Amino acid sequence: MKLSGPRKALVLGAAALATAAAAVSTPSGAVASSRWAPADKATITPGVQMFTAGAQCTGNFVFTDSLGRVYVGYAAHCAGKGAATDTNGCKTESLPVGTKVRFESGGTYVSAGTLVGRGRLAYSSWRTMQAVGTKDGATCAYNDLALVRVAKSFVSHVNPSVPDFGGPTGIRKDGLPAGDQVYTYGNSILRAGVTATSPKTGVSTGDDGNGWSHNVYTVSPGIPGDSGSGFLDSDGRALGVLSTIAIAPTPGENGVGDLGRELAFAQQYSGIPGLRLVKGTEPFVGLG
């Protein structure tokens, strides 16, 4: 399938942060586990604000490996060194594995948030595609997943459930036909702390990039800083990672990278043993 028109990454970069600062000086696939903090008390969950070298994105889902290490995902371009229009992961430079990442809560464009955790970049699809010599155009354009390993001292603050919606109940491994319902939780600092606008619903407008990406409309649309946030389908399955916003031909349409493909790529090339998604401890409720 032909790739989409011009797109723009939704990372909220250091320059934008500096400008803003200057302006103001069990059911439904739920899995109970004593390992995770209670969902209503956890401070590191899907939707957490993540800061990398001045850029802010939103965490998508929680992952673990066979050694018991815990990771939170976001978009690979959140650690990219290019401009917002540089969305080709096979060509754009990225920060190295090991880069420090902060987890925060309540950050806005006028004030800093509360530090709730620390971690380090453990995997970047962009750096990995360059290392293994990926050439496929759709893969380079849409494989946009990174994993941040949560520091041991903060693992006890983690819960894998998606705020407001619950789940995920698993991973969606097929396409997303036009008209299918989607759910997501964005947490951009541009929302000025108004969390009522974070949970969003929308519909698919069809797949792109030979299935590597899903085009969606949500109310409200994703904005810079929401980038990296996770999307669920109508059964609560994790389906993708918010990557881009279309500039043309359909302004405001968000591009969501296919998580099933992104995770399979990471499982093959990341070197992280037994990498897998963690299901939510809370039941998926969707629209309730």
Image (cartoon, rainbow, N blue to C red):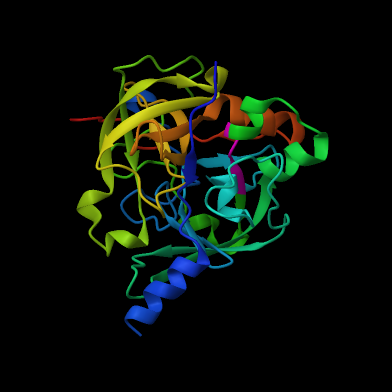
In this view, the residue farthest toward the right is 132
> Which of 147 and 160 lies nearest the eye of the viewer?
147
Q: Quadrant of the C terminus?
A: top left
Q: Inspect the magenta stretch and tell me whether residue 143 lies in it.
A: yes
Q: Where in the figure is residue 287, as x and y percent of width and height?
A: 20, 30
Q: Where in the figure is residue 177, as x and y percent of width and height?
A: 38, 14
The residue depicted at 40 percent of the width and 71 percent of the height is 114
Left or right, 48 with respect to 53, comes to left
Left or right, 241 with respect to 234, comes to right
Left or right, 150 with respect to 131, comes to left
The residue depicted at 39 percent of the width and 31 percent of the height is 249
Q: Quadrant of the N terminus?
A: top right
Q: Inspect the magenta stretch and tell me whether residue 122 lies in it.
A: no
Is residue 98 visible in the rendered structure shown here?
A: yes
Q: Which residues are magenta?
A: 142-147
The residue depicted at 70 percent of the width and 25 percent of the height is 136
Q: Where in the figure is residue 3, as x and y percent of width and height?
A: 54, 25
